[in-house]
Amino acid sequence: MIERRITARCPHIVGLGGNATPGGSAERLLAHALAHCAAQGATTALFAGPAIDLPMYAPHRSERCPKAQAMIAALRQADGVVIASPGYHGTVSGLVKNALDYVQDMAGDSAAYFDGRAVGLIAVAGGWQATGSTLATLRSITHALRGWPTPMAVTVNSAQPVFGDDGAVADPGIAAQLDLMARQVMIFADMQQRHRAAMREALPAASA
């Protein structure tokens, strides 16, 4: 079993998602959320585009490519996670689902899968119907991985104007939702760190 070492430090938030092509809508929304976490004092890591273009997950094979090793190592140290998926045919993309399948490698960890971590969710599609079903799937996956979906999740209809000429989020409503979701991930991460610290302090008293 791999122990997750927790020390007093800034929360570490890992973002995962996007398209196989770098710079897609989901990746830019994910980057916005991570930037807001960083502005609140978090360290962040982004795994999107080519970074999650991984071989098909095969549980019976123990070998892992360097990209998969890097992603899982980052998730093991994460205090919170943000996932962004484009809606493909009414659900999450195969690229994102395959990357999340690799989280099975964390099943035997002391904090299995996403246990004890808040997970912010972003679903983006070229129409509202697909955003809803994609978000529902992301929530179902998060629950299966023992994560805590934040109360605020973000759905984005990419058929409407979302980004400015510089590629940044220009819609103030979407930006506000992303920022709120990021704050909720940070608040939960801080609460979990305080809880773990209190538990560590209580252990000597309990054994005395």
Image: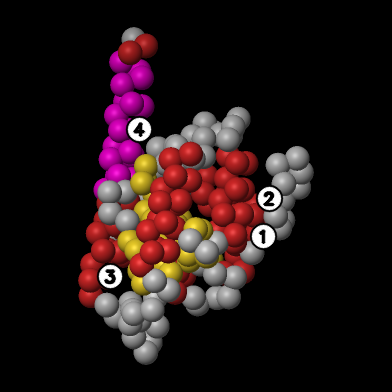
The tag earlier along the polypeptide, 4 or 3, is: 3
- Give the amino acid type for the residue marked by disc 4 in the picture: Arg
Q: Residue at x 31, y 21 (%)?
A: 202
The tag earlier along the polypeptide, 3 or 2, is: 2
How many C-alpha atoms fall within 10 Å of the one at disc 4: few (<14), some, or many (≥20)? some
In the image, 198 versus 59, the foreground residue is 59
- Give the amino acid type for the residue marked by disc 1 in the picture: Leu
Mark 3, residue position: 174
CA gap, disc 2 and disc 1: 8 Å
Residue 111 counted in the magenta span: no
Above or below for 89 versus 14: below
Residue 194 counted in the magenta span: yes
Mark 4, residue position: 196
Q: Secondary structure at mark 4?
A: helix
Above or below for 40 versus 201: below
The mark found on residue 57 in the picture is: 2
Report which quarter residue 51 is drawn in.
bottom right
The tag earlier along the polypeptide, 2 or 4, is: 2
Question: Considering the image in quadrants, where does the C terminus appear?
Answer: top left
- Give the amino acid type for the residue marked by disc 3 in the picture: Ile
Above or below for 197 versus 33: above
Question: Considering the image in quadrants, where does the N terminus appear?
Answer: top right
The magenta segment: 187-205
Q: Secondary structure at mark 3?
A: helix
Contact? badges 2 and 1 (CB < 8 Å)? yes
The tag earlier along the polypeptide, 4 or 1, is: 1
Mark 1, residue position: 54
Contact? badges 4 and 1 (CB < 8 Å)? no
* Percent of width and height locating residue 52: 60, 62
* Percent of width and height locating residue 80: 40, 49
